[in-house]
Image (cartoon, rainbow, N blue to C red):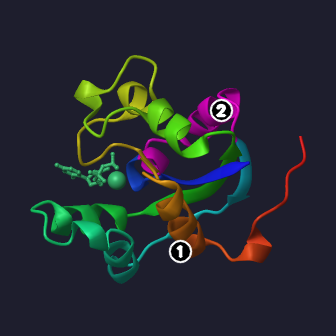
Amino acid sequence: MERTLAIIKPDGVRKQLIGAIIDKIERAGFKVVALKLTRLTKATAGEFYAVHKERGFYGELVEFMSSGACVPMILEKDNAVADFRTLIGATDPAKAADGTIRKLYASSVGENVIHGSDSIENAKLEGAFFFSTQDVVAMHA
Ligand code: UDP
Ligand code: MG
């Protein structure tokens, strides 16, 4: 069973969308196997998004991701990484497909309510960024 790392970003938490977003995720067949409410410091947000360090939006992204609480989760499903990217939609909510989480709830390309890993390898690294192995519950369907 494949896993991916999702984060309900600070805008999603501020808009009180934790329940609505998790409802969409569970209805799409993903099992939540690890979850917490946490707040990133600028340092940890910067480390999580280090791959974007040279991009113009990096400073703003780090500010935003450390601006309030967020909800990282490890999700389990067949083809979890690709299917979750489909469920969340394009980075820019204006370009996201109808019914996707970003189309439904996001307000801008920066504040786009949800993160999803972009590869199986990154899903493992990002999962380990937030959770230890003992935080991850083995789920049996
Ligand atoms: N982002 C932004 N401006 C951009 C592109 C990205 O503020 O022009 C932010 C946005 O929050 C996005 C995150 O940086 O989700 C990571 O960008 P990436 O290209 O990896 O998009 P994602 O994988 O989240 O769809
Ligand atoms: Mg990305």
Circle number at residue 23 = 2
Within-10-Å neighbours for mark 2: few <14, some 14–19, many 20+: few
- Residue type of the residue flagged with mark 1: Phe
Farthest-out residue, bottom:
43
Residue plotted at (9% across, 62% down): 56
Q: Position of residue 112 (x, y in %)?
A: 33, 43
Q: Quadrant of residue 135?
A: bottom right
* Number of marks in picture: 2
The answer to which of 15 and 107 lies nearer the viewer is 107
Tell me the magenta residue range.
12-30
Vertical side of 1 occupied by 21: above or below: above
Q: SS for tag 1? A: helix
Q: Which mark is residue 117?
A: none
Residue type highlighted by circle 2: Asp
Is residue 98 shown left or right of residue 63? right
- Hey, which residue is sitting farthest top in the picture? 98
Of the two numbered discs 1 and 2 on the same chain, state the one appearing first in sequence: 2
Label 1 to label 2, Cα distance in Å? Answer: 24 Å
- Give the residue displayed 44% in from the left and 26% down from the top: 100
Instruction: List the residue tagged with mark 1.
Output: 129
**Does the beta carbon of the residue at mark 2 sit less than 8 Å from ligand 1?**
no
Residue at point 45%, 45% (across, down): 12
Q: Which residue is located at x 65 percent, y 28 percent? A: 28
User: Which residue is situated farthest in the right direction here?
Assistant: 140
Q: Position of residue 108 (x, y in %)?
A: 24, 39
89 displayed left or right of 126: left
Q: Main secondary structure of the magenta part?
A: helix
> Disc 1 vs disc 2: Cβ atoms closer than 8 Å?
no
Q: Position of residue 51 (x, y in %)?
A: 28, 69
Q: Quadrant of the C terminus?
A: top right
Residue 64 in picture, x, y percent from top left: 29, 61
Q: Is residue 131 above or below residue 123?
A: below
